[in-house]
Each structure stands twice: as structure tokens, then as C-alpha cells.
Image: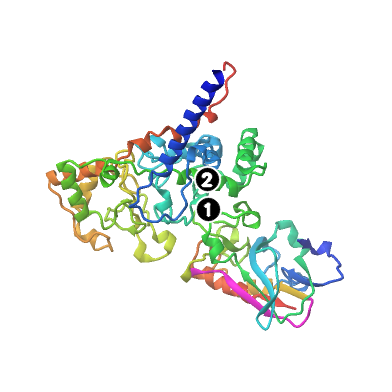
Amino acid sequence: MFFYSSLTCATDKTELVFFLFKDSVISTPIRLSSDDSLSVLRFYISDLQITKNKKVLWKDSVRHRLIDFEKGSFNQKSARILFPLNVLGDHVSFLLGVGEKTAARGIGEGDLDPIKGMYWTWQSGYINFKMEGVSSNSPSRKNKFLLHLGGYKKTLNTNQKVSLSIRNPDINISFDLNKFLYEINFKERHTIMSPCQAAVDLSLLAKACFYVH
Amino acid sequence: MFIKGLITTGTIFLLFSFIRIWVLQDRLPEYLPQPFYQIPTNPINNDTVQLGRLLFYDNILSVNNTVSCASCHSPFNAFAHTDHDLSHGVFDSIGTRNAPGLFNLAWQEEFMWDGAIHHIEAQALAPLHDQREMGSSINDLIEKLQKSDFYKVEFLKVYKDSIINSSRALKALAAFELSLVSFDSKYDKMRGGRASFTAQEKAGYVLFKNHCSRCHKEPLFSSNTYEDNGLPIDSLLNDMGREVVSGRKEDRYKFNVPTLRNLSFTYPYMHDGRFKKLRQVLDHYGTIDNQVLMRNSGIKAPIFLSLDDGADLVSFLLTLNDKSFVFNPDNAFPKKLLPKTKDK
């Protein structure tokens, strides 16, 4: 199920909530000045699961999920998937990306459908993480930045495993957009559209931006 | 009497169908390596293959409904694009590379001259989105197909429901392309003991083994590798080849080693179609200068052949032509796509 924050659902079970970013974070952006904006933010999470002592207690029944923010939805400041849970684990983990095996296979359906704009047409493979927008620091045309992070082959693999420790049955996972934008040097890294070292570096940065709060 | 006649006709028809299926399933010689993809059996009765065949020949794939896959991959040219060095697409745009023949694709690990595409189902996305080819998008195509009464019926036939999505369309195209199998050349007949080479072809075969077979490996006459074959750089195209995909400098000017099968039908040659005649290709390999050979080339020395040897080699290469594949009506334009006229 996919809910925007405006449609917050109350459930009597404990929840795993997948936030994109915290309201408080987006309300005081560090890097995005009034002229700057985000227009696209989409990424795949795969194999979401909760473990205790490395034993899997719960596994998302859907293998790959595309977290997608359309332009208008940024006003909502967060998007969330709610999973009613009744387990108490010590770690929540997922893969940021579709994974090497899925990438190496052919065309998928549902969230993996190439009409979602997350498949390179000139070069095969899924884009694991896509962020586009405008930053006054970007020297490219119209100050745009296009970060399409993909690549699944050994040396340039952008699939990143995220594992976060949890103490609470209610799990809120957030993506720290501030940290991500703060650490990118848009002067040098504004246009990435193929598997490359910069894509691997930024996928590691994205990995480090997820946290449980 | 009538019923008896009907039964006899039915039996003959059934027998004919079985023979046809048997022939089609039996057409793969045993000397072939293991393919990367499964080849659809009995393609003419395979609904997915036939749906793919419709899509392959349909201009609906391009932004302004003028260009189909077959525009640059014509069946009569072993699905290559004869007489154009660089292939052209919508609004008379000219591309940067020569359209290769399409056959025996199940044995190909990666696709395109630079191997940019890693899976056959994903391949069609490249020309579909390229502004110099079809200038469209998978989103537009699926929308058009969903609106088409014709395709609603065709998809229903294959998938037993009315869902039209990109996965189904791309898988169907791939199925048709994988069904294009060409192993009925004189070379194959010779290997199967059904034909023998002339003295000249035999001599050419020896030359081939000595000079060409390292890259153009039998029996596919390709090798799923990328090589710099020493061509002078076309400064207008300045095509970096495999380097664009791999990001490795050592891959500069390397291109996929193409198959030598069906050469008579797939001219012009090389990734940019610069040579119209086989003779020019042989001349190139005979005259590569040392400076180019320094360039990390797959060829270590010029392959100099006398005129006689060249003629022998060409006579062998011609044994790789498979006319029964090129003129197979089962692979040709499907009559279903012909516009329906009122006079009919």
C-alpha cells in the first residue's frame, strides 16, 4: 500500500513506515534555496525485511518497490508505505536498487515496467536512484542537475544494502535529503546518466542517508 | 464418401503439420554451442512469435507512424539495411551506425555494435527512444497499442486477457527475433554431409581458418567479443565504440565482432558501413598501417592475401549465405498488417 502523509492511516497494529524524508528536514532545507528545486525523486527498494539475530522475522511480499515522488507531491513532504507488523526485530534491511540479478534479467512488470522511466534505453539496466532538479551551484544548462544512479556489473555496482538497527516495534525509516544534498558537490557532479564511479560514490552516499528515527 | 475424403484430407494436413514441426525443431545442427536464450519452436504456430512479427513490421512503433523495425532490418537483407552506410529513421534523420543483420541472436550475449544492451528483451527500447531512429517512447507505444482494436485482439490471442503492457510487447518482439535462425547455408550442408565444397571453397576455408577464425569463430562466425579491427577513424563520426559503454580507455574503437554469415545480403560492411564490397574489406585487412596497429588493435599484422587467395577466401565466405532463411515467407511482412480497402 502506498500512502501520502495527508492520508495517514491509523492502524491498531504496529507499523513499519517508510518515509522519504522527515517533515522537519524538508521545511528547513540547507542546500535548496528559493530558486532551487527538486522535480524528480524516485528510487527502488528491494528485499525489505526485519531480522533478529540475523534470522528473518518478516519479509515484504513484494520484491521490488519503486518509491516515486511526482513534482506536486513534494508539497506533501513525505511519502510512506505502511506495513502492519507484529514482530520485534533488531534490524531492518533492504537493498537500495533492484539488485544485480533482476538487472541482468529482461524486462519486468509492475514497478519494474520501463514506462516508469527507470530503465536506460540506450544501455541496458535499471536506474536504481533518480534525482533531478535545479541548483544554483550546478553549472549545466538552466542549472539543472540529473543524477541517474545505475549500473549493476561488478566494478560499477550501484546496488547498496542498507541495514539499520531498530529498538522499537514501530519503525520509521527516513531518507535524509539534507545530508544528501549537502554532501554533493554540484559544481562537479551535476549530470550522471551512465554507470560510472561517481554513480557508485553517490549510491554509497544515498545508502548513508537512510536512518531510523 | 465426403466424410472419408474429409478424413483423408485431414490426415494429410495433420501429417504435413507434423513434418513441418519436426523439420523446424530439427533445424538446429548439433555442432552449435549452447545458446543464451531459448529459441521458440514451431514459430509459425507460436502466437507470441507471430505477435512479435506484427510489431516488428508495424510503423506504429515510430513517433509519426513511418518507420518500423523492418525499415532498417529488411528480411531480404538477412534483416540488415542494404545500400545505406548509416541507417536512417524518422524525419529522414541519419544515425551513426550501420544496421546489422538479425539472425541467430540467441547466441549473442550482448547487442548493438558496442554491446550496450545486455538483454534481448531490452534491445527494442534503444531504437524506439532514439531520436534518429523511431523517436518515440515505450510509454507512447503502449498507449497506441492499448487504443488499437487490432492489437487488443492480437494480445488477447496470446495472453488470454486484454492487458497490453511493455513487458508483453517487448517479450513478443524478442520471441520473433529469436525465431530468426539461419543454419542452412552450404557451409552447414557441408558440415552435415549434405554438400561438399569445391576445390576453391576448400582453399578459401583453409585461408579463413588461418587468418579470420580467431575472431570470427565457427560455427557462428562471430565471437561475442569487441575488437579494434584497425579502421581509420572517421573524424566526422568519431565513434569511440565500446569505450562509451565500458568507460575503459582500452575499449576505444572496439566494436562487436559481427557474424560473417549471410554476407552477400548484409552489405555494406563495418560498423559505419564504409565498405560496399567484400573486396574492399579484404583490401583493408591487407593494408592496415603500422600506426593503426599500435592502437591496441585486435589484428597484429596486415593480412596480406594475393588476388587468387582473396578470390578463394571470398568463394568460401559465399558458402555462408543462407537463401532459404533470407527468402523464408514465414519471416516476411505479415499480410495481416496490410490496410483493409473497401474494394475487397
Whether residue B275 is visible to the viewer of this picture, yes or no, is yes
Position of residue B263 in the picture relative to residue B287 (left or right)? right
> Residue A121 bears which disc, if any?
1
Rendering coords of residue B56 (x, y %): 50, 39
Asked which secondary structure carries label 2, the reply is: helix
Please give the range of residues in magenta: A156-170
The residue drawn where x is 50% and y is 36% is B57
Mark 1 vs mark 2: same chain? no
Which amino acid is tagged 1? Thr
For disc 2, the chain is B
Q: Give the colouring mode of the picture.
A: rainbow
Question: Is residue B71 depicted above or below A188 in this figure?
Answer: above
Residue ID for mark 2: B128
Q: Tell me the distance, in whole angstroms, between the alpha carbons under discs 1 and 2.
A: 8 Å
Rendering coords of residue B44 (x, y %): 49, 37
Question: Is residue B114 depicted above or below B98 in this figure?
Answer: below
